[in-house]
Image (cartoon, rainbow, N blue to C red):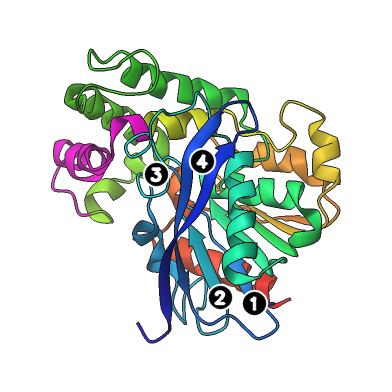
Amino acid sequence: MDWPVQDGTFALGDLALKRGGVLPDAKIVWRAHGTLSAARDNVVLYPTSYGAQHPDLEWLIRPDGVLDPTRWFIIIPNMFGNGLSSSPSNTAPWPALVTAHDNVAAQKRLLRDVFGVDRLHAVYGWSMGAQQAYHWAAAYPDAVERAVINCGSARTSTHNRVFLAGMMAVLEAAPEFDGRALFSAQPRAALRAFGRLYAGWALSQDFYRADLHLTALKAPDLETFYRTDWEDRFARRDAADLLAMLRTWDAGDIADGGDLAAALGGITARVLLMPSETDLYFRVADNAAELPYLKHGRLAPIASIWGHRAGNPVANPDDAAFITREVRGLLGA
């Protein structure tokens, strides 16, 4: 890399949680790309997404990419539950629920205490990262100038929760599950089923109709695609971590059960809503319903058949080019 990169672990102590309980000896593992300006006014926060750790998401950080590290100071805080920051796999006892509210409150402390940063030029997030970006804009309106909501929503929709309930049930049905949060061993059969079910949701019907799993993703056949792109991917993560993050996703709500319109109306940041036209759980309709309540919102759907993965287009140059143009337009404005 031709730009500075820093790594660190931020200790928070025992962290009181939004919905009750405590996350003991909490920590955030983070990585930063680029150089913090003297005025501390070039910070872009980039929270992680479901099952992802910071190396999985760094592909878009490059001078010609979505986030330019020669211009912006890009901080990636690993989400609680992802196996690097505090997670069931490295923290005991694990509380019943850690929310997006808890993540962003801890991230705010990280920015203040480690970097002396009180205001973000932007927060950028995809999927669960987008949920955190929305929570940032709602919880700390004076601290966020711009927010990119890439395939995410302000409140997890009922249909999205139906998907999540099914995925949670797969893990909770495993004989290794302790009935609360942990597993006596990795539930390999359950994780195999988990990956195969996920494959039917993360990509659209049109994606499969076009055989892009074979052409764009280079799988020799469907069975191999199940294994290499989904089973192997989730097998790298601890099942208890995957379950904890599903619960966080399910509870996503910037209003925390209250008045969503009021919470959206309190956001002062310029918000770019960037859903995929074929996403099966974060729908364009969700963002379209949020848009009228935002003071400075713009809806820019990704015209793609890649479903949810249009928002993380590692192997999809057309969608990557669209996202790069939109995000650079917002960040430079």
Amino acid type for the residue under numbered disc 1: Asn
Mark 3 highlights which residue? 82
- Structural distance between the alpha carbons of marks 1 and 4: 31 Å
Q: In which quarter of the image is residue 90?
A: top left
Which tag, 4 or 3, sits closer to the chain's start? 3
Q: Which residues lie in the magenta part?
A: 218-241
Question: At 21% from the left edge and 24% from the top edge, which residue is drawn?
Answer: 187
Q: Quadrant of the N terminus?
A: bottom left
- Can you say whether 242 is above or below 297 in the image? above
- The residue at which mark 4 appears reads as 279
Which residue is the site of mark 2?
Answer: 73
Q: Which residue is drawn at 85% across and 47% down?
A: 266
On the rendered image, what quadrant is the C terminus found in?
bottom right
Residue 204 in sight: no
- Local secondary structure at mark 1: loop
Q: Where is residue 77 in the image (x, y as percent from the top left)?
A: 49, 57
Comparing marks 4 and 2, which lies closer to the viewer?
2
The label on residue 42 is 1
